[in-house]
Image (cartoon, rainbow, N blue to C red):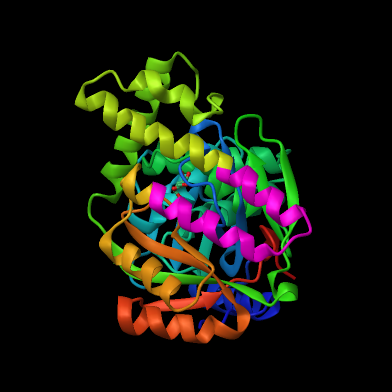
Amino acid sequence: MSEVPTDEEAAARAVAAFTDRFGGPPEGVWAAPGRVNVIGEHTDYNGGAVLPVALPHTTRAAVARRDDGRLVLASLQHPGADAEVAVVDLAPGSPGGWAGYPAGVVAELRDSVTGGLSLLVDGDVPAGAGLSSSAALECAVALALRDLLGLDLGPGDLVDVARRAENDFVGAPTGILDQSASVLCTAGHALYLQTRDRRSEQVPLDLAAAGLALLVVDSGTTHSHAESGYGDRRRECEEAARRLGVELLCDVRDVADLAPLDDGDERGALLLRRARHVVSEDARVREVVGLLGGGGDPRAVGPVLTAGHASLRDDFEVSVPELDAIVETALSAGAHGARMVGGGFGGSAVALVDAADADAVATAVTERAGATRSFVVVPSAGARRLP
Ligand code: GAF
């Protein structure tokens, strides 16, 4: 299990590190969380629904304006990898690496960043674990710039700025799930977001009251084809939508309506599987929201999560043996349901467990499935300025 600092502790640590690095205090410290998605994977770029919760783990940005037109970036998680560049010279991929995420946000807002910025990053969102550490960083910086520069940006604008940084500057073709979760989630709730029209609803999620816990399990693996695999899936979904004559795959509501994709050739069969995942996953989001809001036993959500895993594994083919083993082990250790989360090809899984079994399930996935870390998620607050 991993500990996270309080907002006050996190702010004090960021102020001290900033002062040490830049010789004076920052003008403020902003934090944004990572996320875990309860259900709704690979639906966001298909116009479907998602149901993330914000993690208690956040990324913090301590920021001060400069007057020399330069952007200077430092990170406690990347010692020795500071980056410095003139704001006018920011261009996709330059700087790259960790600094590309904050730089991408600054590039998006560069018309307002006339004097330059000093920025120090700290955080505890596990990196490379499929828990949105990159979106947390983008959103913390976007919020900092809005406040510091007095920009007229609503929550949806912040999501878009952060997402464009990831798509256009870093070059990762993601949807809006991660940035929306980081900005819009609230403590004690899951965010039920329709990505088509951005309507959202806060769904109360007090699993502890039902004697339950949502356990996040990090597989400790990231496969090298994660990025290319994600892009491939996006293109396959777009092709399936084109063949069906719909704008986005989630315009199809019934899996039976996907039958025309199976035109007898191999490509058609593959597109049918991809589309079947997306359309059935979108329905699973609605099912889970219904179960959580229906006043029944939230344990009923478990099998829906497990069905989501089977769909990601068999139809969408984004799981990996390490995640399959974690899911199987968690289920055999008593979890009510379990599935991989995020884009896939490595990263983390979630398991819905009786709170009393959380430690036993965590031990089982570590000892029998090679998991590197587990923690119980308390649905936490979205992006905010720290005190
Ligand atoms: C990644 C992406 F960034 C999200 O936009 C989403 O598509 C997710 O994979 C899969 O649901 O986290």
* 32 relative position to 385: left or right: left
Quarter assignment of residue 356: bottom right
Residue 68 can be seen in this image? yes
Name which residue lies at 70% across and 43% down.
155
Q: Residue 173 magenta-drawn? A: no
> Which x, y percent locates residue 265?
21, 22
* 382 relative position to 77: left or right: right
Name which residue lies at 47% across and 64% down.
338
Name which residue lies at 61% across and 50% down.
51
Instruction: Using the image as rendered, state which of residue 163 and residue 212 is in the foreground.
Output: 212
Q: Main secondary structure of the magenta part?
A: helix
Name which residue lies at 39% across and 52% down.
310
> Which x, y percent locates residue 233?
34, 37
Instruction: Using the image as rendered, state which of residue 221 and residue 76 is in the foreground.
Output: 221
Q: Residue furthest top?
A: 245
Quarter assignment of residue 65: bottom right
* 111 relative position to 338: left or right: right
Q: Give the range drawn in magenta.
A: 284-311
Q: In this view, does 78 lie above or below 1?
A: above
Q: Is residue 19 above or below residue 381?
A: below
Q: Residue 301 magenta-drawn? A: yes
Instruction: Using the image as rendered, state which of residue 356 and residue 80 is in the foreground.
Output: 356
Query: Number of marks in the image?
Result: 0
> Which x, y percent locates residue 180?
61, 46
> Which x, y percent locates residue 345?
31, 54
Q: In this view, does 142 lie above or below 328?
A: above
Which quadrant, please, contains the C terminus?
bottom right
Q: Residue furthest right?
A: 295
Residue 76 can be seen in this image? no
* 26 relative position to 279: left or right: right
